[in-house]
Image: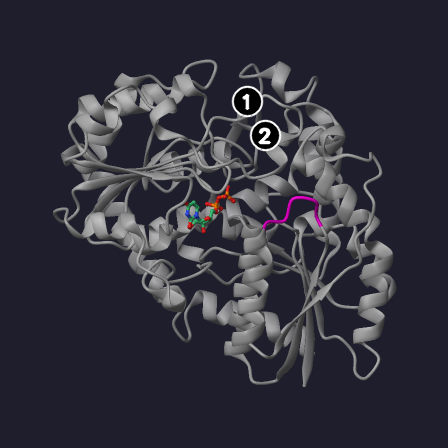
Amino acid sequence: MEKIVLYPSPGIGHLISMVELGKLLLSHSSSISSITILIANFPSLSSSYSSYISSVSASFPSITFLSLPSIPLLLGDPSNYEDVEHMLYEILRSNSQNVKQSLESISISSPVSAFIIDFFCYSAVEVSQTLKLPTYFFFTSGASALAFFLNFPVFDKIATDSYRNLKDSASFEIPGLFSVPASHMLEPMLDRGVSYHEFVKMAETMPKSDGIIVNTFESLEVKAVKGLKQGTCLPGTQIPPVYCIGPLFANRGAGAENNGEERHECLKWLDSQPSKSVVYLGFGSRGMFSKEQIWEIAFGLERSGVRFLWTVRAPPSQEKGANLSQPPDPDLDSILPEGFLDRTKDRGHVAKSWVPQIAVLGHESVGGFVSHCGWNSTLEAVDAGVPMVAWPLYAEQRFNKILIVEEIGIALPMDENEDWFVSSSEIEKRVKQILGSEGDIVRKQMLKMSEKGKIALNEGQSSNVALTALMESWIH
Ligand code: UDP
């Protein structure tokens, strides 16, 4: 019987993806006796984090959570960090000794078969390799993004300045895939601060693992999967086996009367709308806009005349460190243009901060999705077969925009100006297009990918075969 240890990075999105991976492993093989998930302490973990852990523990007795002791921040206060990623990498590195002790104690009765870590936890590789544990990365974005990440050390050697300064004067080629303008690089890598160097080191460490598990399916990202398997996307470096086991979803079915909770207001509203008539605007767990941009969205939606469901968050606070915790719910009357809610009440629904997205995308009335291009959101849209309008905001989302608009063809672009501001006329145009005949090509391609994604998970198909190969790799 096998014991598996998972090590997600803190943050609900990464934890949920890792738990889903754990559930998938358990459902695929009866030879797994236990899955232990190491939880690193992080200053801004919300109460939903611990309630999520309790609910998983109650439903899956083979999954155990092990909280690592909390560690004081080296810089004292979260506001002293340049960004969330800086703090995240530091906390995870400070935890190395705790991770080592946990792995040793879990191994006492019988050895650990595999140690699977999030890319943010790369500093744990040193520990697990000292203990001679098979160590795998779980990459929560796609295969193309993995090829992009693996090239960070190469880009680092050729970039003549910070990506922010280079803007569009330089672009960086992922061999066999496409070029990425400096302005579209990972948001925390735009300046050459601590996070930049951490990402480069992380990318140097990934190839030293026993394998990389990716939340995608082969037919969605054909070129990247081929490039990773044949090593052509990173010449001169041996890439370990890559296992594309997706699409894996967080919280499948959330929002429908799950756990006895009442159905979300927005779903009740969607029930009363005609089929495929609503455009949903949702920007992930952290997407926020300035008040000016919120107004521009409101004007665009109002002029477009389309039906919409829009999740609105309060604009970001200017206070240092404020982006490290969830903002309070917005006061809609003070941040939306006067009278907007009233004028659009017959065809629009505005939700505060959060909606059950998987249930929204799966709703019959939803026909288009204006998205920040987070990878989970993208896979959820693919699963539901809902075409997208790509409006990236942070992390690797500008890269994902190129991928889903130009390579896969499942999204229309939201064109931005130099400061990444989007005009109301662009918003008006795109929401109309995605629901109308101008969205036909991306809609058709999305439905095709949706079909392929469902097939990939079936027995004998690519993701299922990859999962079997992964599990065989640690047994032999
Ligand atoms: N999500 C949700 N409701 C919201 C916003 C987000 O359920 O109002 C979920 C969404 O379904 C997805 C995750 O949060 O599973 C966001 O992950 P993604 O990778 O798209 O973006 P991130 O939040 O990591 O930027």
Q: Secondary structure at mark 1?
A: helix
Say the numbered circle drawn on residue 292.
none
Task: Look at the image and tell me in which quarter the C terminus lies.
Answer: bottom right
Residue 33 visible in the shown view = yes
User: Farthest left residue?
Assistant: 274
Q: Nearer the viewer, residue 79 or 94?
A: 79
Residues at marks 2 and 1, CA–CA distance in whole angstroms: 9 Å
Does the beta carbon at disc 2 come under 8 Å from ligand 1?
A: no
Q: Local crowd at mark 1 within 10 Å, few (<14), some, or many (≥20)?
A: many
Front of the two marks 2 and 1:
2
Residue at 37% over, 68% down: 260
Residue span colored magenta? 42-46
Q: Mark 2 touching mark 1, by CB under 8 A?
A: no
Q: Nearer the viewer, residue 398 or 358?
A: 358
Question: What is the three-letter code of the residue carrying label 2?
Answer: Glu
Q: Which residue is mark 2?
A: 187
Q: Position of residue 131 (x, y in %)?
A: 86, 67
Quadrant assignment, res 79: top right
Quadrant assignment, res 407: top left
Question: What is the three-letter code of the residue carrying label 1?
Answer: Ser
Task: Look at the image and tell me in which quarter the N terminus lies.
Answer: bottom right
Q: Is residue 448 left or right of residue 235?
A: left
Q: Which residue is mark 1?
A: 183
Residue 229 visible in the shown view = no
Q: Position of residue 15 (x, y in %)?
A: 59, 56
Q: Is residue 91 left or right of residue 63?
A: right
In the picture shown, does residue 2 fall above or below 24? Answer: below
Residue at 20% over, 41% down: 278
Q: Secondary structure at mark 2?
A: helix
Inspect the magenta stretch and tell me whether residue 92 lies in it: no
